[in-house]
Amino acid sequence: MGSKFVILSDIHANLSALKAVIRDFKEKYKPDGIFFLGDIINYGMRPNEVILEIKALSKEYEVMCNLFGNHEKALMDSTHFSRFSSERGRVTLKYTKDILTADSYEYIQSRMQGEGYAEILLNGRSVLCLHGELRDVYWGKLTSESMKEESYSKYDYVLSGHTHFPLHVEMFYAGGCIEFRGKKRTVFMNPGSIGQPRNHNPKAQYLYWDMGTDTFHYNAVEYDIALEQSLYTDAVDVFYKNRLLNGI
């Protein structure tokens, strides 16, 4: 297994943003594998096209994980439907469900990991991948407070999505080996969102990670926002169209 990876999260059916990210990492990097941290569907207009693009990528690169996000979970499990914070979110998911093809639905059901998290031993290091956080892998938000929990200390790296904010934090827990002065390092990474960024930067965001050199490149890529906005219909609240312009 190689040591160079791209980490993608929260695509949200935004095909233009995903294609721009793919062009960017193919030009800049030579990844050995790809992490998908969930929420490939909903809010955007092209879930089927995004799934086709991901299928094509899966033929070129090893997929390290392909997690359910809260949107996939709500699509497949009606008990999660009420957990959206707004009615417009529920209405949009109904619209997404209506336009999904049978092939797309089957892909989500059989090719994505419904547990919402994965533990991977990678190049001798322990990696936790999850959409949210350990107490709620679908809907929870990893915060500076929750990172203090000792349950994360057994991992060398924690990859998460869901917040739509890029994040890089290195925590040092007690109980490490004497060579490191009794400290255990865990690196937390969130690549930000490709299709619905909320950090006031409308560019499509992703992370390149080289384990071999312990380097992390957080990337923000321009894409044709106007094109993606032009595809919205009255079936989806205009809020999701407008927010693309300002990254909110």
Image: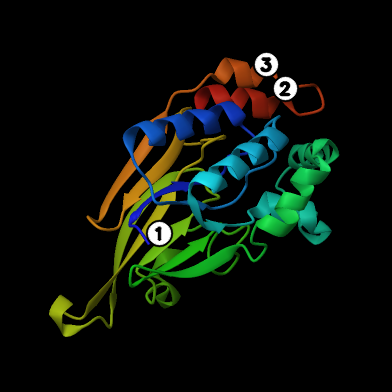
Q: Is residue 232 left or right of residue 247?
A: right
Q: Disc 1 marks which amino acid?
A: Ser
Q: Residues within 10 Å of mark 2 (few under 14, many from 20)?
A: some
Which residue is the site of mark 3? 230
Its colouring scheme is rainbow
Mark 2, secondary structure of its residue: loop
Which residue is the site of mark 1? 144
Give the residue displayed 53% in from the left and 30% down from the top: 19
Give the residue displayed 46% in from the left and 28% down from the top: 203
Query: Along the polypeptide, which appears first: circle 1 or circle 2?
Result: 1
| C-alpha gap between disc 1 and disc 3 | 38 Å
Mark 1, secondary structure of its residue: loop
Q: Disc 2 marks which amino acid?
A: Tyr
| C-alpha gap between disc 1 and disc 2 | 36 Å
Q: Residues within 10 Å of mark 1 (few under 14, many from 20)?
A: few
Q: Disc 3 marks which amino acid?
A: Ser
Mark 3, secondary structure of its residue: helix
Work out whether residue 83 can be spotted: no
Asked whether the beta carbons under mark 3 and mark 2 sit within 8 Å of each other, the answer is yes
Give the residue displayed 55% in from the left and 20% down from the top: 225
Q: Is residue 204 above or below residue 212?
A: above
Q: Position of residue 104 (x, y in %)?
A: 75, 44
Q: Is residue 194 above or below residue 107?
A: above
Residue 113 is marked as none
Q: Is residue 217 above or below residue 228?
A: below
Give the residue displayed 67% in from the left and 62% down from the top: 114
Which residue is the site of mark 2? 232
Question: Quick one: 76 or 201, which is closer to the camera?
Answer: 76
| C-alpha gap between disc 3 and disc 2 | 6 Å
